């Protein structure tokens, strides 16, 4: 999924579950679970992209996700918890970045890449964006009802 989708999922979990001892582990496991849903992201076709292009697409996606998460959830949870939840939700992909960008094909980066490669389910545009939007929207709505 895009970094924006992961950030929104992490932030919505933090907003719905005020106890970080419960929320942070849920945020951590949300990433691979969300990646199992067919989706599109900027990493698709990463081998054929210029590394600088991939880097800037990833940074833009991450920045947009953090800003949108702050706008939507920043008033309902402490900023420390919110940003920690976003960071943890992104950590699976952040730990793959050295593999993609620097060609560091050794542990722990290779472990995260291989796990992500096995658990990611991809879909082409526009369906891959629609599945993400539906997943994030549904999860946010369910968590708001629970909270």
Image (tube, rainbow, N blue to C red):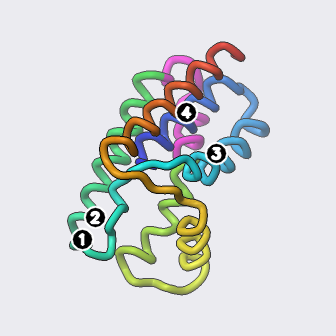
Is 140 placed above or below 127 here?
above
- Of marks 4 and 2, the one in the foreground: 2
Mark positioned earlier in the residue sequence (4 or 1): 4
Where is residue 23 drawn, in percent x and y?
71, 36
Q: Which disc is residue 88 wearing?
A: none
Q: Please name the residue that numbered disc 1 is placed on.
A: 49
Q: Residues within 10 Å of mark 1 (few under 14, many from 20)?
A: few
Q: Residues within 10 Å of mark 2 (few under 14, many from 20)?
A: many
- Of marks 2 and 1, the one in the foreground: 1
Q: Which residues are magenta?
A: 73-88
Mark positioned earlier in the residue sequence (3 or 1): 3
Mark positioned earlier in the residue sequence (4 or 3): 4
Where is residue 144 drawn, in percent x and y?
62, 16
User: What residue is shown at x 57% (from left), y 38% (from top)?
Assistant: 10
- Of marks 4 and 3, the one in the foreground: 3
Instruction: Based on the picture, tell me whether residue 23 belongs to the magenta stretch.
Output: no
Q: Which disc is residue 30 wearing?
A: 3
Q: Nearer the viewer, residue 74 or 61?
A: 61
Q: CA distance from mark 2 to mark 3?
A: 24 Å
> SS at mark 1?
loop
Q: Which disc is residue 54 wearing?
A: 2
Q: CA distance from mark 3 to mark 1?
A: 27 Å
> SS at mark 4?
helix
Q: Residues within 10 Å of mark 4 (few under 14, many from 20)?
A: many
Q: Nearer the viewer, residue 34 or 50?
A: 34
Q: CA distance from mark 4 to mark 2?
A: 24 Å
Q: Please name the residue that numbered disc 4 is placed on.
A: 11
Instruction: Based on the picture, tell me whether residue 74 belongs to the magenta stretch.
Output: yes
């Amino acid at each position: 999924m895009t970094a924006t989708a992961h950030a929104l999922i992490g932030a919505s979990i933090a907003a719905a579950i005020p106890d970080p001892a419960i929320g942070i582990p849920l945020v951590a496991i949300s990433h691979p679970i969300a990646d199992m849903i067919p989706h599109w992201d900027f990493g698709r076709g990463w081998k054929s992209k210029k590394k600088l292009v991939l880097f800037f697409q990833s940074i833009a996606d991450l920045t947009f996700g953090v800003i949108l998460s702050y706008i939507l959830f920043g008033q309902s949870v402490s900023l420390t918890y919110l940003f920690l939840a976003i960071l943890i939700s992104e950590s699976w992909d952040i730990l793959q970045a050295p593999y993609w960008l620097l060609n560091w094909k050794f542990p722990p980066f290779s472990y995260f890449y291989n796990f992500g490669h096995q658990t990611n389910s991809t879909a082409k545009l526009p369906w891959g964006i629609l599945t993400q939007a539906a997943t994030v929207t549904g999860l946010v709505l369910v968590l708001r009802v629970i909270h």
